[in-house]
Amino acid sequence: MSGRFISFEGIDGCGKSTQATLLAEHLTDRGIAVERTREPGGTAVGEGIRAALLASDSVTPVAEAHLFAAARAELVATVICPALQAGRWVVCDRFIDSSLTYQGVARGLGIDAIWDLNRGAIGDCLPDLTILLTISMDEATSRRGAQLDRIEREGQQFQRRVAQGYAMLAERFPERIVAVDGNGAVEVVQQRVIEAVDA
Ligand code: TYD
């Protein structure tokens, strides 16, 4: 039997890495074999692309979109598909929706263009469920801390466009994307995530 694929999405500082880890632990406790991975990264090639993307001073938007798609293609082919085929569940910190909103909306390349680029990279491998953690801009900014990567340094206007993009995606893919309130204590948000997964 094929496993289930769950991705986590949200603006920088929304808490998705913490919640992805907690969900993976929760599923493991329930006896489910889980592959916890992240984007960009999760493979040797992907971690190399991640370092180049986040540490460089500047990357043109089109090159940025292709690099994220390349890291994703590698992750899908070598980690996600094999895990799902072996019956394991996959919990992934970010997936295609990050590209659709960061590159498609916030960078202005267009959702459809980024969709086409990524469909070549991932084929039919889409999440069964995407948890979109929503959070106030101020809360996210205060959670981000002082060490910001290149994309986080784009500032609040950029993050606002990312959040608008996520809202558009949640309307466009209502059968897959579930918005979960990410404000509040970690345990409270975790409970909301578990309810969304159970539903
Ligand atoms: P993230 O994992 O959130 O960074 P961190 O673990 O440091 O919190 O992701 C790194 C950044 O890459 C983040 O700002 C979002 C961005 N990103 C894109 O712009 N497009 C993409 O397709 C992906 C996967 C991430």
Image (spheres, rainbow, N blue to C red):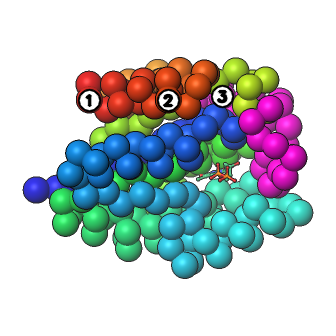
How far apart, in angstroms, are the residues tagged by discs 3 and 2?
A: 23 Å
The span from disc 1 to disc 2 (Cα, nearest Å) is: 16 Å
Q: Is residue 1 left or right of residue 198?
A: left
Residue 144 colored in magenta in the image: yes
> Which residue bears the numbered disc 3?
163
Magenta segment:
142-166
Q: Is residue 166 visible?
A: yes
Q: Nearer the viewer, mark 3 or mark 2?
A: 2
Distance of label 1 from label 3 (alpha carbons): 25 Å
Identify the image quadrant of residue 58.
bottom right
Q: Give percent across and percent down for residue 92.
A: 45, 52
Q: Which numbered disc covers residue 198? A: 1
Residue 63 percent location from the top left of the image: 71, 63
Q: Nearer the viewer, residue 199 or 27?
A: 27
Q: Earlier in the sequence, mark 1 or mark 3?
A: 3
* Secondary element at image label 2: helix
Residue most extreme to the bottom: 44
Residue at the image position 23 percent from the left and 45 percent from the top = 30
Secondary structure type for disc 3: helix
Which residue corresponds to mark 2? 187
Callouts 3 and 2 close, C-beta under 8 Å: no
Question: Dot 1, crowdedness within 10 Å: few (<14), some or many (≥20)?
Answer: few
Residue 64 versus residue 30: which sits nearer the camera? 30
